[in-house]
């Protein structure tokens, strides 16, 4: 989540740092296309996933094998061609569930039906993002906080709750006879007609209606895939899954019809529908989560064994350095972070200033910025293809003194200045901190070293013969970090666009940074107060009930009189005459 804009722009924003909230294209990158919405009913209509299982008879597999490729039994191919950059699989609700949802639209009465139906429509429209720009611009520009989040298609997680809810209500109406037989049959025919028409359209006309291309196809061709083979498999997947959904609709609709015609009992209906739903979800889900995704404990733990490169770096007994792993996608992988303090790593919502540094400097291999981030070691691909270690002798450490201050007037000048400066001698300071450095001319002398590191508490020892400006290789974050000198709170500033700067008096001093967010402390205080109120209220209630018991003990019940036993009269036999 991002806040106010940092950088200025003269045209359309190029990044989220230049706008309030997120930049439109960045926020709307994961926007569903129209065909992606139908994937909630027909799983493979948009190609499934970017790594979709491809059987031995698929066109892609046959084409690759004709080129001499040796493919594993569980081979996957990039068959997805919808509106998203890539995806692990569709947001599939289930054909049976979706069919009953359609029935619910015509069977369920009252405001609940309308709220659920409108909720499904709204969330689906919002999930389309930039592909329905006229509608979604309204929410993005005017609804509070909406422009702080990305991936519009993720809102379908709400839809996945609404659709089954109306489906269950529709089934409840039928099995509890809350509607007439005529109403149930009418909704069955309408929902079956709509669902069947959608399936038949994609099964019969879909393969010739869409082009089945993806912006990534050119890259796939360079990787060895044949474009025509990809299109052929995408068409085949749409057709087969459309017929699959059609059969599930026919079977579930047939069960409901047989129940309404009193040809099957209720338990047969429920068991049959449960079996269809399990079959539907299980078979579709196994495409993306199956036994191949589960490994033994030893295989899993093998991921956390240090490589020879990691072992070489870990021989450095000084823990205060960072590692830049260039053998992986540095800012998409957290592998290096398992063993080292890492320059890279992944987070879906990085601090905007750090994202700016990635975009403008780290992606351009700006050695000055890597030095000020204390990148002492680089992991690179060696000549033998194995990871190798390169030590950076110019890494500046976790803190240092500077001898010069360069003032800049804007955030743009501040970040641009990082392309041409000596971070070990000079600090770039924004004019908003001009009062802090006014009348101060640093002269670099003395030392400052880190003596203790905890994620929320950093400790340094400083010694110098004159007042110094120290730069700390830690990200500046003014929503909780507080600086202390010899236990007394002091102000610190931002330098070099993302780092921390602090004026330290002459002499020997202990410098600390503690993460003490005010919001957390207030929340903890509020939690303590209300928890205490609840506890005191509970104790008071128990005490009051005890007091009432002592003052008004319950009366002992009077002894019950024995219930008289009624004797059942026995009929006497009348004397009869003896038979002769």
Image (cartoon, helix red, strand yellow):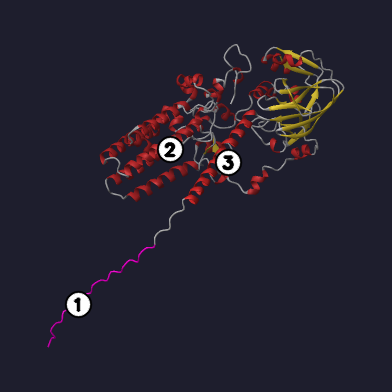
What SS does tag 2 mark? helix
- Quick check: is 172 in the magenta stretch? no
Q: In this rendering, would 272 be left or right of 388?
A: left
**Considering depth in this image, is 40 or 240 the residue closer to the camera?**
40
Q: In this rendering, would 255 be left or right of 456?
A: left
What SS does tag 3 mark? loop
Q: Which stretch appears magenta?
A: 559-580
The residue at 58%/12% (across/down) is 11
**Considering depth in this image, is 410 or 62 the residue closer to the camera?**
410
Mark 1 nearby-residue class (10 Å; few <14, some 14–19, many ≥20):
few
Q: Total of numbered circles in the picture? A: 3
The residues tagged by marks 3 and 1 sit, at their Cα atoms, a distance apart of 99 Å
- Quick check: is 561 in the magenta stretch? yes
Residue 577 is at least partly visible in this image: yes
Quadrant in which residue 419 is drawn:
top right
Quadrant in which residue 515 is drawn:
top right
Which residue in the protein does label 3 denote? 71
- Any mark on residue 572, and which? 1
Q: Is residue 2 above or below residue 187?
A: above
Quadrant in which residue 509 is drawn:
top right
Which residue in the protein does label 2 denote? 241
Q: Nearer the viewer, mark 2 or mark 1?
A: 1
**Considering depth in this image, is 283 or 466 the residue closer to the camera?**
466
Query: First in sequence: mark 2 or mark 1?
Result: 2
The residues tagged by marks 3 and 2 sit, at their Cα atoms, a distance apart of 24 Å
Q: Position of residue 212 (x, y in %)?
A: 47, 29
Mark 3 nearby-residue class (10 Å; few <14, some 14–19, many ≥20):
few
What SS does tag 1 mark? loop
């Amino acid at each position: 989540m991002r806040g106010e804009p940092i950088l200025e722009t003269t045209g359309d924003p190029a990044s989220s740092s230049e706008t309030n909230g997120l930049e439109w294209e960045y926020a709307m990158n994961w926007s569903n296309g129209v065909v992606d919405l139908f994937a909630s009913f027909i799983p493979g209509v948009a190609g499934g996933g970017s790594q979709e299982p491809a059987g031995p008879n698929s066109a892609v597999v046959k084409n690759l094998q004709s080129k001499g490729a040796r493919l594993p039994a569980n081979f996957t191919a990039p068959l997805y061609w919808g509106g998203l950059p890539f995806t692990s699989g569709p947001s599939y609700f289930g054909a049976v569930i979706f069919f009953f949802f359609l029935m619910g639209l015509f069977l369920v009465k009252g405001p609940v039906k309308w709220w659920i139906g409108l909720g499904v429509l709204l969330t689906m429209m919002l999930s389309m993002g930039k592909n329905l720009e006229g509608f979604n611009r309204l929410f993005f520009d005017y609804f509070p906080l909406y422009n702080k989040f990305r991936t519009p298609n993720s809102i379908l997680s709400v839809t996945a709750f609404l659709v089954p809810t109306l489906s269950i209500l529709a089934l409840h109406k039928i099995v509890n006879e809350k509607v007439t037989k005529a109403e149930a049959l009418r909704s069955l025919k309408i929902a079956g007609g709509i669902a069947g028409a959608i399936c038949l359209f994609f099964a019969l006309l879909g393969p010739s209606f869409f082009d089945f291309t993806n912006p990534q196809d050119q890259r796939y061709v360079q990787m060895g895939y044949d474009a025509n083979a990809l299109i052929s498999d995408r068409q085949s997947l749409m057709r087969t899954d459309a017929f699959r959904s059609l059969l599930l609709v026919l079977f579930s609709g047939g069960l409901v019809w047989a129940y309404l015609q009193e040809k099957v009992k209720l338990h047969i209906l429920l068991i049959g529908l449960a079996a269809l739903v399990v079959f539907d979800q299980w078979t579709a889900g196994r495409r993306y989560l199956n036994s191949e995704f589960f490994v033994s404990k030893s295989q899993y733990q093998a991921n956390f064994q240090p490589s020879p490169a990691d072992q070489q770096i870990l021989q450095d007994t000084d823990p205060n350095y960072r590692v830049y792993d260039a053998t992986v996608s540095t800012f998409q992988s957290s592998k290096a972070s398992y063993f080292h303090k890492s320059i890279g790593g992944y987070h879906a919502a990085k601090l905007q200033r750090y994202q700016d540094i990635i975009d403008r400097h780290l992606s351009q291999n700006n050695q000055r910025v890597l030095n000020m981030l204390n990148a002492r070691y680089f992991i690179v691909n060696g000549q033998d293809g194995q990871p190798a270690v390169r030590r950076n002798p110019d890494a500046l450490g976790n803190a240092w003194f500077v001898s010069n201050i360069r003032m800049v007037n804007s955030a743009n000048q501040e970040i641009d200045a990082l392309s041409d400066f000596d971070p070990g001698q000079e600090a770039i300071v924004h004019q908003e901190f001009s009062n802090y450095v006014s009348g101060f001319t640093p002269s670099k002398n003395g030392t400052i070293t880190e003596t203790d590191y905890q994620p929320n508490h950093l400790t340094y020892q400083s010694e110098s013969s004159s007042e110094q400006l120290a730069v700390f290789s830690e990200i500046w974050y003014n929503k909780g970090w507080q600086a202390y000198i010899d236990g007394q709170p002091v102000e610190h500033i931002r330098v070099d666009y993302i780092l921390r700067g602090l004026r330290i008096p002459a002499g020997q001093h202990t410098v600390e940074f503690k993460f003490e967010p005010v919001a957390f402390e207030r929340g903890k205080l509020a939690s303590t107060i209300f928890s205490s109120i609840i506890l005191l209220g509970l104790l008071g209630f128990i005490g009051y009930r005890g007091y009432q018991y002592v003052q008004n003990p319950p009366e002992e019940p009077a002894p019950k009189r024995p219930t008289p036993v009624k004797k059942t009269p026995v009929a006497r036999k009348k004397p009869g005459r003896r038979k002769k």
